[in-house]
Image: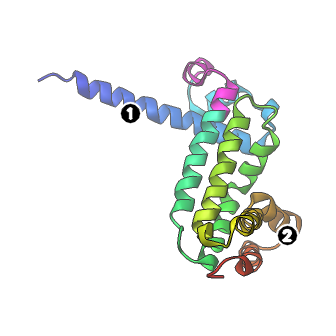
Amino acid sequence: MNKRPYRMTARADEALRTGDRIIDAMLQRYGALPYDRIRLEDVAADAQVTAQTVLRRFGSKAGLTVAMAERELGRIAAARGSVAGAGCAATMASLAEHYEKYGALILKMYSEVRVVPGLAELAVRGREYHVRWCADAFDLASAGDGPTRERRLAQVVAVCDARTWAILRLESKLSAAQTGLALHEMLAPLVTDG
């Protein structure tokens, strides 16, 4: 019996785990520090690998940052997809909970698009996803004629935006529950199942 495929699979699995550890370490650093103060040596130490391993795997600090943002965007899409069609109140409560976890990261990513090569393109993809999610989650395909539908979608996108969450939660210092309720109250008049 040939044991080589097993070793290759085990090696591939270990490479995936190593990549995830590196991305997790970058996520921790990225959440705590400005991008220009993050050192690959520190990320590597946190992930228990060498800086050379990080560079071999991701090419650069910018490459690692984009890989981290791509992974988290996939997680965001999965979490948001799980509440589609749950009704306005449940969807907005879930969105507020989602922003408790990802809001600061999303806002930071948008603020650093000019600093990190490749991040601007990812931010555009994230924004396009957000608009599609809003249209689908609140069934805006049937929201009147063309201009009315476009205006309604723009309103829903604005209410559901991380910046709106930040105004309510961070600037106005509402609790997480009150933020979810405020988002629901703002959105309810705009959707059919308010």
Q: Is residue 28 visible?
A: no
The local crowd at label 2, few if under 14, some if 14 to 19, many if 20 or more residues have their Cα within 10 Å, is: few
Q: Mark 1: which amino acid?
A: Asp
- Which residue is painted at 52% across and 37% down in the image? 20
- Give percent across and percent down for residue 83: 54, 68
The residue sitting at 60% across, 17% down in the picture is 52
Q: Quadrant of the N terminus?
A: top left
Task: Report the front residue among 19 and 150.
Answer: 150
* Predominant SS along the magenta part: helix
Image quarter (top left, top right, bottom left or bottom right) of the C terminus: bottom right
The tag earlier along the polypeptide, 1 or 2, is: 1
Q: Quadrant of residue 183?
A: bottom right
- Label 1 crowding class (10 Å Cα cut-off): few <14, some 14-19, many 20+? few
Q: Where does the image place residue 163, in percent across and percent down from the top left?
A: 80, 58
- In front here: 179 or 121? 121
Q: Read off the residue under disc 2.
A: 173
| Residue 72 circle label | none
Amino acid at pointer 2? Lys
Q: Nearer the viewer, residue 140 or 22?
A: 140
Question: In the rendered structure, are the residues bearing label 1 and label 2 in contact, judged by CB atoms less than 8 Å apart?
Answer: no
Please tell me in which quadrant of the rendered image residue 60 appears.
top right
Residue position marked by numbered label 1 in the rendering: 13
Q: Please name the residue shown 28% across and 25% down the image.
A: 7
Q: Secondary structure at mark 2?
A: loop
56 falls in the magenta region: yes
Residue 43 lies, in percent from the top left, at 66, 31
Does the rendering let one see residue 51? Answer: yes
Stretch in magenta: 50-65
Picture quadrant where residue 14 is located:
top left
Q: Percent x, y for residue 67?
A: 60, 34
Q: Is residue 162 left or right of residue 11?
A: right
